[in-house]
Image: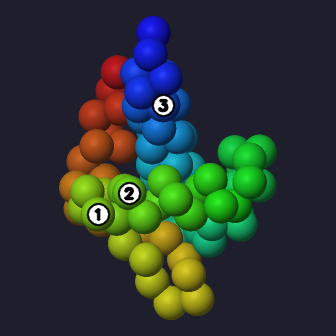
Amino acid sequence: MSYRDYSDQTAQGWDRSILEVLDRTNQATAAELAAALETHPMTIERQCRHLQREGYVRRGVAGTYTLAEEGKRRAESMAAD
């Protein structure tokens, strides 16, 4: 497995974890997500920016993240898996 493959796989894992937490909590800051996922807030911030560009999350007031409609659909489909 190349570094790129490993990196992509790890990012997908973070994406899934972030979407699952936001599905349960409705909104959270990067610090709250990092605490829930036991990682550094910068890791979460980077992944949330990626998810925002993909249309899965929105960043609101005071830096809180929420699921966008596409993120809600993806979280629902992941829950069905």
Q: CA distance from mark 3 to mark 2?
A: 14 Å
Task: Say above or below: 63 vs 53.
Answer: below
Q: Amino acid at mark 3?
A: Ser
Q: Position of residue 2 (x, y in %)?
A: 44, 16
Q: Can residue 30 be seen in this snapshot?
A: yes
Q: Nearer the viewer, residue 14 or 79?
A: 14
Task: Determine whether the residue tagged by mark 2 lies in a helix, strand or loop.
Answer: helix
Q: CA distance from mark 1 to mark 3?
A: 18 Å
Tags 1 and 3 touching, CB below 8 Å: no
- Looking at the image, tell me whether mark 1 or mark 3 is earlier in sequence order: 3
Q: Residues within 10 Å of mark 2 (few under 14, many from 20)?
A: some
Q: Residues within 10 Å of mark 1 (few under 14, many from 20)?
A: few
Between marks 1 and 3 in the image, the one whose residue lies nearer the viewer: 3
Q: Residue furthest bottom?
A: 61
Q: CA distance from mark 2 to mark 1?
A: 5 Å
Q: Position of residue 18 (x, y in %)?
A: 52, 49
Task: Say above or below: 60 vs 30.
Answer: below
Q: Which mark is residue 50?
A: 2
Task: Say above or below: 6 vs 20.
Answer: above
Q: Quadrant of residue 52?
A: bottom left
Q: Nearer the viewer, residue 17 or 2?
A: 2
Q: How many marks?
A: 3
Q: Amino acid at mark 1?
A: Arg
- Residue at horizontal 45 percent and vertical 43 percent from the top: 15
Q: Which residue is mark 3?
A: 7
Q: Which residue is mark 1?
A: 53
